[in-house]
Amino acid sequence: MADEELVDQKKYLEESCQPKCVKPLIEYQACVKRVEADNNGEKHCTGQYFDYISCVDKCVAPMLFGALK
């Protein structure tokens, strides 16, 4: 058991949950494009980023603790 390589299960579960969170991802990507065009440096996409990450986390949470040893 000591020889086994540890694998981060959350990483794999996040990849499986990403298709369920397409709408927040599209909104985040659209915001990033708008911010890239901003010359003032005052705009940011923090809200959209957290919406996307929150969606993924809500999907992962029920599956994660069952996958842990």
Image (cartoon, helix red, strand yellow):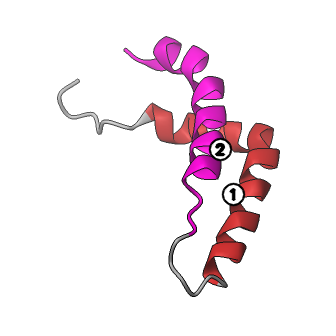
* Quadrant position of residue 63: top right
Give how far across and how far down residue 23 sits, in percent.
82, 47
* Quadrant position of residue 40: bottom right
Say left or right for 64 vs 69. Answer: right
Query: Dot 2, crowdedness within 10 Å: few (<14), some or many (≥20)?
Result: many
The residue closer to the viewer here, 3 or 64, is 64
* Quadrant position of residue 26: bottom right
Q: Are marks 1 and 2 in contact (CB under 8 Å)?
A: yes
Q: Is residue 44 above or below residue 17?
A: below
Query: Range of the magenta residues?
Result: 43-69
Q: Is residue 14 magenta?
A: no
Query: Dot 1, crowdedness within 10 Å: few (<14), some or many (≥20)?
Result: many
Q: Can you tell which mark lies on residue 52?
A: 2
Q: Is residue 5 above or below residue 32?
A: above
Name the element at disc 1. helix
At label 1, the amino acid type is Tyr
Q: Is residue 42 above or below residue 26?
A: below
Q: Is residue 44 magenta?
A: yes
Q: Can you tell which mark lies on residue 28?
A: 1
The residue closer to the viewer here, 7 or 34, is 34
Name which residue lies at 68% across and 39% down.
16
Q: Would you say the magenta stretch is mainly helix, strand or loop?
A: helix
Residue ranking furthest to the right: 23
Q: Is residue 3 above or below residue 18?
A: above
